[in-house]
């Protein structure tokens, strides 16, 4: 069976090449083999000495094409291709194209005698230089390649090189480049049966439809530049995925302008690329002129644009109608719909049900506000700060306070219905399922309480405080503890079913989705566990503690980390979809809608991020850190801030 | 995770009930009229069948399969534990069949060593510090290094499904495929690592000239000394069917046709044989291998 394994050249050399000519062999009574300088798919390339010039050491390159097939039509085709390359080369005259001196056939092998180009091909350069190549060097080569492509494409009909890649580009000691290999191998059809491994990597998508155009060479030049600048070998990655590794990310010498030029050359659609090599050269020349003249100026003005545009809340305090917060939407302020001032920090996260917003505050009150207008409806005073998020069930609001008591008050009037004392401050938020409320306490216990009358049905005791809020499954309740464990407790009896150990405290509240329990830990990881067994299915490491909780939508997990990023991870495998740098620590939980993800930061910002792309849509700055998590209801985002305000912002 | 018992503290006086009454929710499974006959006729628990055929053109069968069923019965329940591996080898001089089997064996050995002891007996083997996906990726990486070192001219696809309880964890490289059959339709889990699939993903049209390029893979086990592995998590329900196949099947039959056969037969092994026979009737240019796991919770 005809199966082939196409490979990058270095591994191709593992193959025992059939019978290269030994050094000393003389062909045509004239060309004496010195050594093999390259192995290709069709034969070797030798360095030879031309013995016609007895007095001079005249060196040539001898390129060999071995015809292995016995099929006469294939043999004829091979001979034609060989002659074609010889004739193309003979007609060309350019300093970056090696001169052809002669061609001949000897025992089933065809030979081209070419100018010997001293130097190293760029694939060898990549092997020798172990760091990403500096941008100026690569741009210099690219400009020279644009020149030779302009020369080739200027023929009538245009000559398309079709196989531009690092191994076909030689760099002479003078830093001048030369294109070698005018296509013996590439026009041969390499067997169309059997599965092959390895793509050409540098070829444009349309080349696989048999289209060869000057724009294809431009794509290949873009691919070559990308490889040189990033060291990411396109033959070892999915085809056409250059955009996944922007050169500026791995190579600091690459400017955004240069990156834009490379990515334009790499567009899928040939009509969107540079229309000619000349045009690309002009762009490259302009880009290196810009980067040289403005490099220092830009460095000295190194101010993040987004910070520059933002107005500090305190600076705007002269305008009381704007209040503490200012939002920036493409440089233009957006106003809160309303804002409500409490007496202390609002760390609790608001909840909106039936047009009423409920939120706790460190002034010890639970507030009920009209969600549309911000109008005060009622408040209920406890004897401690309220950090937990209220839970609305039927006609009542359930929440714990730092006064150690769990309360149920009427959602309509704020009248007390029942209380349930615990032995520690309550920061965990309650969940209600099967007519029972579940919440944790600093007394280390997870409580299951009858939501009608506050009677405790069971308590589960962990080794440390429980500040995480539970998630309720079909049979189990899941909750994290400061004792580093995530516990699964029998919903009916409160007995432990399994526990999973992380390396630090778990304050993050688990979320149950598709049979996976997803949560963060202060050991910097996000975990997904199998709900039944507690086995770790995947984990994703951030660069700081994960205190906030995940939200899941459309099979994607959204979670913030104190490393300042909002992450979007695939639910099934924890793979990064995108991450967004908020610029400040994140300890809250995002709110997710079909289009947007809203996240608050300890820098005081509420940020709207496009859910699909992870790009910022707008940013609103409050006057103090925001550990409170945003909540979306109808057309507004609600959030509390440590500046004592509750804000309603337009989505 | 551990199974150390840590009873909840019961304090006196303030309790209303002994336990929270849990109503068993309707299971999320396949609705009974759409439960395939091959599931209804299968014994309770997990049933795994497979078959492989050389096809009608090739001289060698370069496909390999490996199946390990460790399901057990505990506390009046069937606990599904199984490993299904399918590999489609390639490479000259008949080394493709060696590569596929080597990769399958090596990956299976890693999974048996790194996951099975802890899963079957955490009391003895303890808890691993790595996740299941990390362990599966590691298993494929070890298989990759082994093929790369021992069979330098060969490569193979590798699609592996590890069933643990009511989930299947899938690791995948190449253009073999894993599917689930849900409510009478086939849903593909894996993504082909082929040039043709990438061209489609980038919105290119596939022309006739492309047909010869269909089989170019950009990722395969044994291709280079490092490898990127795709992983997936699938929930299994009563009535779920998991299908792994080589391109010898899916290049000859549409997803709908495969689903029709699976829904139309009453015996799992017969369904697998029929799929292979149909691929052969349509030319059988390639080796054809199919693994089918059906999940019957009664």
Image (cartoon, rainbow, N blue to C red):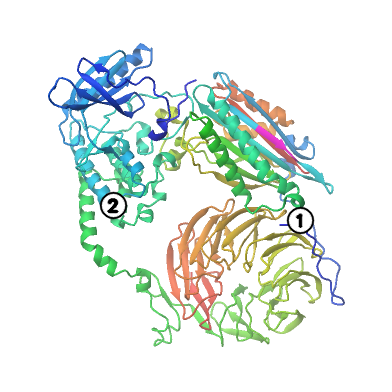
Nearest the camera: B149 or A386?
B149
Residue A243: in magenta span: no
Q: Label 2 neighbourhood size at 10 Å, few (<14), some (14-19), many (20+)?
A: many
The x, y position of residue B228, in whole percent, is 51, 44
Subunit ID for the residue under disc 2 = A
Q: Label 1 neighbourhood size at 10 Å, few (<14), some (14-19), many (20+)?
A: few
Q: Secondary structure at mark 1?
A: loop
Q: Look at the numbered discs 2 and 1 and tell me whether their residues touch, using CB distance below 8 Å.
A: no
Q: Which residue is mark 1?
A: B25
The x, y position of residue A536, in whole percent, is 65, 54
Residue located at (39% from left, 83% from top): A316
Q: Main secondary structure of the magenta part?
A: strand
Please state which of the two labelled residues, at mark 2 or mark 1, is closer to the viewer: 2
Q: Quadrant of residue A118?
A: top left
What residue range appears in magenta? B66-70
For the C terminus of chain B, the quadrant is top right
Subunit ID for the residue under disc 1 = B
Q: Which residue is mark 2?
A: A135
For the N terminus of chain B, the quadrant is bottom right
Q: CA distance from mark 2 to mark 1?
A: 62 Å
Residue B68: in magenta span: yes
Q: Is residue B189 visible?
A: no
């Amino acid at each position: 069976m005809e199966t082939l394994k196409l490979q990058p050249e270095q591994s191709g050399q593992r193959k025992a090449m059939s019978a290269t000519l030994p050094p000393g062999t003389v062909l045509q009574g004239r060309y004496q083999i010195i050594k093999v300088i390259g192995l290709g798919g069709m034969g070797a390339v030798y360095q030879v000495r031309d013995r016609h010039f007895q007095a001079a050491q005249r060196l040539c390159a001898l390129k060999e094409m071995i015809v292995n097939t016995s099929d006469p039509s294939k043999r004829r085709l091979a001979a034609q291709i060989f002659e074609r390359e010889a004739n193309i080369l003979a007609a060309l005259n350019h300093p970056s194209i090696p001169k052809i001196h002669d061609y001949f056939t000897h025992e089933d092998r065809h030979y081209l005698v070419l100018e010997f180009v001293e130097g190293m091909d760029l694939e060898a350069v990549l092997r020798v230089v172990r760091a990403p190549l500096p941008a100026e060097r690569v741009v210099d080569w690219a400009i020279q390649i644009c020149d030779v492509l302009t020369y080739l494409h200027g023929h009538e009909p245009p000559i398309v090189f079709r196989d531009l890649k690092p191994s076909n580009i030689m760099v002479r000691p003078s830093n001048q480049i030369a294109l070698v290999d005018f296509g013996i191998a590439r026009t041969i059809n390499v067997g169309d049966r059997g599965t092959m491994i390895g793509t050409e990597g540098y070829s444009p998508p349309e080349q696989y439809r048999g289209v060869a155009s000057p724009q294809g060479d431009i794509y290949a030049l873009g691919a070559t530049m990308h490889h040189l600048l990033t060291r990411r070998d396109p033959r070892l990655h999915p085809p056409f995925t250059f955009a996944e590794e922007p050169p500026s990310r791995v190579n600091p010498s690459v400017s955004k302008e240069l990156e834009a030029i490379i990515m334009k050359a790499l567009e899928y659609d040939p009509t969107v690329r540079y229309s000619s090599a000349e045009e690309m050269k002009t762009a490259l020349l302009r880009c290196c002129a810009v980067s040289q003249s403005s490099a220092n100026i830009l460095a000295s003005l190194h101010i993040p644009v987004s910070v520059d545009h933002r107005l500090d809340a305190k600076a705007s305090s002269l305008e009381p109608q704007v209040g503490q917060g200012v939002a920036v939407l493409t440089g233009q302020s957006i106003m809160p719909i309303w804002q409500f001032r409490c007496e202390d920090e609002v760390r609790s996260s608001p909840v909106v049900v039936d047009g009423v917003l409920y939120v706790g505050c460190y002034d010890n009150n639970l507030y009920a506000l009209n969600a549309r207008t911000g109008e005060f409806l009622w408040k209920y005073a406890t004897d401690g700060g309220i950090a937990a998020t209220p839970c609305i069930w039927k006609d009542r609001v359930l929440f714990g306070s730092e006064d150690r008591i769990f309360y149920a008050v009427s959602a309509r009037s704020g009248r007390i219905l029942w209380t349930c004392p615990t032995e520690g401050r309550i920061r965990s938020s309650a969940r209600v399922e099967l007519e029972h409320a579940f919440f944790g306490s600093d007394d280390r216990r997870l409580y299951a309480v009858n939501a009608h009358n506050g009677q405790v049905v069971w308590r589960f005791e962990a080794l440390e405080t429980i500040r995480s809020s539970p998630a309720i499954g079909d049979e189990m309740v899941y909750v994290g503890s400061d004792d580093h464990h995530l516990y699964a407790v029998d919903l009916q009896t409160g007995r432990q079913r399994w526990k999973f150990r992380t390396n630090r405290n778990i304050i993050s509240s688990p979320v149950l989705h598709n049979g996976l329990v997803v949560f963060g830990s202060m050991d910097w990881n996000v975990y997904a566990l199998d709900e039944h067994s507690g086995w770790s299915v995947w984990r994703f490491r951030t660069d700081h503690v994960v205190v906030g909780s995940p939200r899941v939508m459309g099979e994607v997990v959204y979670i913030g980390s104190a490393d300042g990023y909002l992450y979007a991870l695939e639910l099934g495998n924890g793979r990064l979809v995108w991450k967004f740098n908020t610029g400040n620590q994140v300890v809250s939980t995002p709110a997710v809608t079909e289009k947007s993800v809203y996240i608050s930061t300890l820098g005081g910002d509420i940020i709207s991020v496009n859910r699909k792309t992870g790009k910022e849509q707008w940013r609103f700055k409050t006057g103090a850190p925001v550990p409170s998590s945003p909540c979306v209801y109808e057309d507004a985002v609600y959030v509390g801030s440590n500046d004592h305000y509750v804000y309603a912002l337009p989505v | 995770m551990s199974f150390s018992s840590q009873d909840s503290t019961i304090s006196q006086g303030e309790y209303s009930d002994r336990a929270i009454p849990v109503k068993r929710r309707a299971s999320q499974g396949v609705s009974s009229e759409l439960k395939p006959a091959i599931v209804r006729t299968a014994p309770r628990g997990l049933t795994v069948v497979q078959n492989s055929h050389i096809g009608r053109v090739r001289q060698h069968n370069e496909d390999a399969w490996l199946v390990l069923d460790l399901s057990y019965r505990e506390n009046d329940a069937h606990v599904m534990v199984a490993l299904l591996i399918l590999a489609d080898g390639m490479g000259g001089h008949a080394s493709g069949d060696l590569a596929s089997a080597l990769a399958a064996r090596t990956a299976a050995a890693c999974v048996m060593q790194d996951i099975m002891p802890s899963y079957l007996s955490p009391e003895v083997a303890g808890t691993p510090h790595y996740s299941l996906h990390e362990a599966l990726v590691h298993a494929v990486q070890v298989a990759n290094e082994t093929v790369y070192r021992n069979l330098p001219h060969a490569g193979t696809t590798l699609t592996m499904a590890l069933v643990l309880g009511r989930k299947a964890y899938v690791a995948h490289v190449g253009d073999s495929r894993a599917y689930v059959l849900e409510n009478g339709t086939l849903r593909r889990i894996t993504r082909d690592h082929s040039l043709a699939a990438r061209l489609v993903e980038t919105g290119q049209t596939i022309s006739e000239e492309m047909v010869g390029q269909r089989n170019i893979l950009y990722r395969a086990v044994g291709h280079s000394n490092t490898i990127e592995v795709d992983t997936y998590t699938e929930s299994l329900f009563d009535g779920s069917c998991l299908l792994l196949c080589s391109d010898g099947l899916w290049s000859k039959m549409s997803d709908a046709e495969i689903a029709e056969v699976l829904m139309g037969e009453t015996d799992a092994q017969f369904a697998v044989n029929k799929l292979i026979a149909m691929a052969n009737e349509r030319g059988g240019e390639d080796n054809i291998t199919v693994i089918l796991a059906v999940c019957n919770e009664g």
